[in-house]
Image (tube, rainbow, N blue to C red):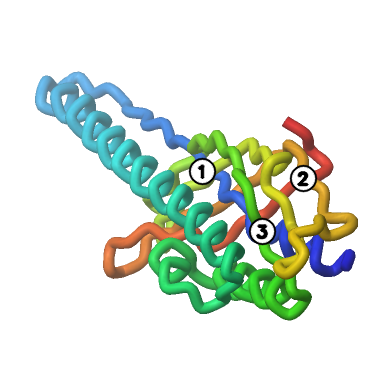
């Protein structure tokens, strides 16, 4: 069952998102001086828009993972609305492991994500997210008996995730990790 515990932890992997700051240089011409604040405001607005979209994808990912873990259904359609590879494959494998072992996840998973980095210049653009996951109320139990799976205790720990903007404009969670050695 230890393998099942590691697989379950993949279901709560979080992406670290970071906020970018813009710098401008001043020029003696009034046109350059006027253009710099406008460019900074535009960059800030784009970063804020990206942050909002990435956090929405992250919250959707957590919800879709919880719902998929309750069935368990590794092909749950909401997973592809919010999660992309390589994380999608890891989440599906973890849900498949639950199903294979006759286990499900029940209860509540608490989350408090925030953006740490926004990199709109990257190809593709990315947002990093950090979260404090509280899985003390999110239990792995055997589907038939509802008894807890041994060694599958929850806790409070840091999780990080990466949201990526895809060519169709969607922000999807593409990578994530739980840091059970980092309590929060």
Q: Residue at x 65, y 40 (%)?
A: 133
Q: Which residue is drawn at 23% across and 30% down?
A: 41
Specify the label residue 154 is tagged with.
Answer: 2
Q: Quadrant of residue 101?
A: bottom right
Earlier sequence position, callout 2 versus callout 3: 3
Report the side of 45 relative to 106 (left or right): left
Q: Mark 1 points at which residue?
A: 17
The percent coordinates of residue 119 (x first, y second) are 44, 47
Pick the quarter of the image with the C terminus: top right
Instruction: State the CA–CA distance, disc 1 to disc 3.
Output: 26 Å
Report the side of 28 relative to 66 (left or right): left
Instruction: State the CA–CA distance, disc 2 to disc 3.
Output: 11 Å
Q: Which residue is drawn at 41% across and 49% down?
A: 54
Q: Name the residue under label 3.
A: 105
Considering every residue shown, the one lying at the far front of the view is 145
In this view, the residue in front, 9 or 121, is 9
In this view, the residue in front, 130 or 143, is 143
């Amino acid at each position: 069952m230890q393998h099942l515990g590691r697989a379950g932890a993949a279901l709560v992997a979080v992406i670290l998102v970071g906020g970018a700051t813009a710098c401008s240089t001043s020029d003696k011409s009034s046109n350059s001086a006027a253009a710099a604040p406008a460019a900074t405001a535009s960059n800030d607005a784009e970063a804020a828009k990206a942050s909002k979209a990435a956090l929405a994808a992250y919250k959707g990912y957590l919800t879709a993972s919880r719902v998929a873990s309750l069935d368990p259904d590794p092909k749950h359609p909401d997973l592809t609305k919010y999660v992309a590879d390589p994380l999608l494959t890891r989440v599906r494998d973890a849900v498949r492991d639950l199903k294979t072992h006759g286990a499900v996840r029940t209860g509540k998973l608490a989350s408090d994500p925030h953006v740490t980095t926004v990199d709109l210049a990257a190809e593709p653009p990315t947002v990093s997210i950090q979260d404090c996951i509280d899985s003390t109320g999110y239990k792995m139990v055997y589907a038939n008996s509802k008894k807890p799976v041994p060694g599958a205790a929850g806790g409070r720990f840091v999780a990080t995730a990466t949201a990526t903007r895809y060519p169709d404009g969607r922000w999807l969670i593409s990578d994530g990790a739980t840091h059970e050695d980092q309590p929060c």
